[in-house]
Amino acid sequence: MEMHHETQLDKELRELKNKLIRMAAIAEAMIDQTITELVNRNEQYAPEVSKEEEELNRLQIDIDEQVVTMLATRQPVASDLRAILAATKINSELERIGDLAINITGNVHTLVQEPPLKPLIDIPRMADLARKMVNDSVKAFMTGDNDLARSVILADDEVDALKDQILRELLTYIMADPRATERALALILISRHLERIGDHATNIAEDVIYITQGRDVRHPKTPR
Amino acid sequence: MEMHHETQLDKELRELKNKLIRMAAIAEAMIDQTITELVNRNEQYAPEVSKEEEELNRLQIDIDEQVVTMLATRQPVASDLRAILAATKINSELERIGDLAINITGNVHTLVQEPPLKPLIDIPRMADLARKMVNDSVKAFMTGDNDLARSVILADDEVDALKDQILRELLTYIMADPRATERALALILISRHLERIGDHATNIAEDVIYITQGRDVRHPKTPR
């Protein structure tokens, strides 16, 4: 009976992790799709992206419900407990990454109505970096890879630097021609949304380090 | 012994909630101080705000550690369990509100170097609204007041509307005089930071409704 109980917790932990992997895959797809729309100057993925956001919302609630049930019925301790707690923080981060992808589609909608302002190089690069940060942060959680989590935190500096570079460049466009203001601002906002996606991946990486690594592990008073 | 055990959990829950109240008070103070600096055109609170951010970081980790310990040693169920889970989401939101206040101080630093662009009315109003949302969201958690949580979610629309209004107005300043670009952008960014503070308060309110209200409450298989 004790054996069976433990196996059941392992199975539920695997389910929980699979749901997070699915959330991360959806969030990454949304980033790719919105930036592809921006580069191709169309809104081909609009219906798909909107369905993906709903799916992220469902999965977030699903994970929270599973966490409550697992904590109440399995009473996990030590690393299992910390993994479950991290899951309930990470699902919120992934859901918000989806919200930011939706924000990007709003700016893309503005941009496709107007002639292109400039060739896009830094924003697609920033999007690739941010998407990789999301992937790596969740992978770090799955594998318990502390070094990978730390690399995500370091990558955030690169994303921030790109955001500043994009801002400086676009300000020169506005200064040169105030009619460029709306389009330049839409691109500035896209770079901010991507920066925030990087921030959420960084939050996940920090959760991996601070929660799952159990910096402050205390042994339960009531061993099972 | 069972009685004593329960009392200990209650005491720890009270401590946990007090730490969240303290985090909320600090986050609110940071909003007030940064916007006061903006209005007064100085950086009088800079050392204080930076200490407050550190205190928020400490409290966030402190709460997460307490949550792990409480779950492992007290094995709470039902509404206690949900309150503890909500606490570990809410502390992250409050910590990020502090980060956004720090972002505002960066924009204030830019603005105090230059002559004032315009009288500030909407931004202080937006800051008041955002600060009240933070207060109400945490109060809703403390008192389990679902209606108050819902009012926070509704207030977010007002904050978003102010943000759009501020953006439209400042764009006209840029169009009229490109030399206003940097200052206008700093004010636009402050309004975005305030909007995000409202988003975090909304996240807290949603956590109150979805987690602490136990929309999907399941009874534990192993009653204590």
Image (tube, coloured by chain):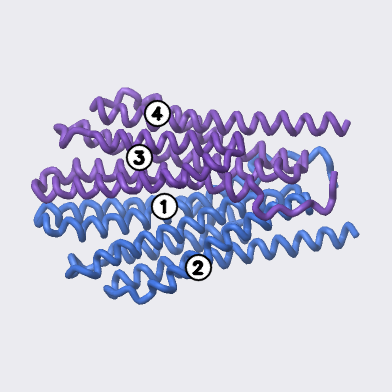
Chain colours: A purple, B blue
Whichever of labels 2 and 1 marks the residue nearer the N terminus, that label is 2
Q: Residues within 10 Å of mark 4 (few under 14, many from 20)?
A: many
Q: Residue at x 53, y 52 (%)?
A: B205
Return the mark for residue B156: 1
Along the line of sight, the residue nearer the viewer: B35 or B144: B35
Residue at which label 4 appears:
A49
Question: Does A107 appear above or below B62?
Answer: above
Can you tell which of label 1 and label 4 is closer to the viewer? 4
Q: Residues within 10 Å of mark 1 (few under 14, many from 20)?
A: many
Can you tell which of label 2 and label 1 is closer to the viewer? 2
How far is mark 2 from mark 4, CA to CA?
Answer: 37 Å
Return the mark for residue B26: 2
Which residue is situated farthest in the right direction here?
A: B1
Asked if marks 1 and 4 touch (Cβ < 8 Å), the reply is no
Please name the amino acid that badge 4 sits on: Val
Along the line of sight, the residue nearer the viewer: A107 or A176: A176
How far is mark 1 from mark 4, CA to CA?
Answer: 23 Å
Q: Quadrant of residue B210?
A: top right
Q: How many marks?
A: 4
Asked if marks 2 and 4 touch (Cβ < 8 Å), the reply is no
Please name the amino acid that badge 1 sits on: Asp
Residue at which label 3 appears:
A103
Can you tell which of label 2 and label 4 is closer to the viewer? 2
